[in-house]
Amino acid sequence: MSHFAPNTRCVEPPCSEQVHLQLGGPGEMVVVFASAPSTNTVARVIFGEAGVPSSKLAVFGTTATYSQLVYWYAKHWNPDMGLPTLTPEQVAAIRTTSSWASDPKSGLHGSAWENISVEQVLEEGDQLGNYKNPSEHYNSPQLHTVVLRGLRGGQRYEYSVDRDDRVFSFVMPEDTFPFTFGVTADVDQTEVTNATFQALAAMAPGAVLLAGDLAYANGYYPRWDSFGKLAEALSAAVPTMTCPGNHETGYMEAFQSYKARYPMPAAASGSTDPTYWSRDIGPAHVISLNSYAGTHRNSAQYRWLEEDLASRFDRRRTPWLVVMMHAPWYSSNTKHLQEPELMRGDMETLLYSFGANVVVSGHVHSYERTAPMYNNASDPCGTTYLNLGDGGKGKANVKWLPGEDDAPQPEWSLFRQASFGVGKLELVNDTHAYFRWHRHSCYDEEAPLNENFSASACVSTGDDSLQKTLVSDETWIVRPSVAQCKGQEQHEAQMKARPRSPSFASLIGIPSCGQDELLNTTTGECIVVRGPARRLDTNFV
């Protein structure tokens, strides 16, 4: 990927880059950054309260790398929208081994011998790389993960990572009203993606919820590195909390790159799988589910969700229950129709019984907001679904289902549009949240790279929604009263009072770390550090 310039702000490049934040356990912020394996970069972050040099600490963490066989995906060189990742000529050159995979004496071809033409690349399309060709194996940069602990809500902190002269800052989220979430999904790596990140940063949210499909690497793993560069301006300043989408598991991804780069607070929330987790963020209990893991009643994810709702969700502390998952349970778009129906059948009643207020999803490349829903019908005690798969990926999904009796739109679909924008969810108080979606661009087959940034006037090519010309959607989301939804309150009380068997996480216990180790509460592991977290001399550079 040549579209994103490397960071050069250090004494001796190559410099560290791809800096991003995510929340860990209570009072924790997790910093992840990447560096070239050829450097002597260590997993170290220097941080302290903004404007207070004497508060600086050096904290050490862990370093990991991984390798993975490339999957060749034709849309890398023929995208729906935006610049190509590769050209067919580049792919042919990488796949060709004829310069070395033959015996120079006999002239016999070795088992790895390939002489790939551009025409062959175009004809073959999608396929897994050749494991015999080292050039088709991706080798990651060093990925450094450092956990900052003991942070106070509302406090701004400054930090810098090893081998990088830049100084970043963030505000630790507070458990108070009002609290703002930026919400998006399906972001990719286009100019539209950049517009999404800029719009999210302009909100100055307490946290961003990104409901899956991040890099769209699709098996060409260098795209994870270019995505990290593109997202850095936002995610180095605002904790970005994610769930996996189909593009984190399909195309031979198998969650590997996602898990290595975006460590969510799974262990801190009792989850034994890093792809689903929960955390109190501001005045909300946020639950992140994996649409591509087991969801039936005896699955690990369902049992964890049940335990989380019963033991970690406390409406008195966090009045709002917000759920994030990639595939939307309610969508009136023809794309991906009914895909997550089994998951909805498995889990919807459980979430309804605890009064889930908002579900944030993506997957469908458009925006849609529903009425409060339960069991395929509007329900005043149900959940509002915000489908935000309009973050920047490719061709918008423009075809919509009609309503009943030839109505142009289902009654429960309150707003829908096949363009690109971002959502702002502001929790105003215990009972009221204000949501605003705003368009910033459209998919336009007559525009350069199919991207049209005339947000006030554009309409995506082929969009047949009633709201296709509107620039924004704004609404109040109101939590129903206890009197309205007594059944939910009673069920929640019964579940919390019910004796529970210990979870696997509680059975293994919290490890006791040695003198030269630190407990990473995000992973539940003791990590050996080069030195204990120590207070720095104010002249330390």
Image (cartoon, rainbow, N blue to C red):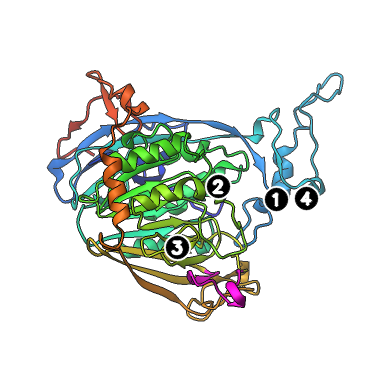
Amino acid under label 3? Thr
Q: CA distance from mark 4 to mark 2?
A: 37 Å
User: Mark 1 or mark 4, which has the lower sequence index?
Assistant: 1
Residue on which disc 2 sits: 342
Amino acid under label 2? Leu
The reply to whether the C-beta atoms of the residues labelled 1 and 3 are less than 8 Å apart is no
Residue on which disc 1 sits: 74
Residue beneath the point at 75% across and 28% down: 100
The reply to whether the C-beta atoms of the residues labelled 2 and 3 are less than 8 Å apart is no
- Which quadrant of the figure has residue 19? top left
For this view, does 210 lie left or right of residue 153? right
Give the structural element (helix, strand or loop) at label 2: helix
Give me the disc on residue 196. Answer: 3
Whether residue 418 is in magenta: the answer is yes
Give me the disc on residue 290. Answer: none
Q: CA distance from mark 1 to mark 4?
A: 8 Å
Give the structural element (helix, strand or loop) at label 1: helix
Instruction: Return the x and y of residue 155 as percentages of the image width and height.
Output: 18, 51
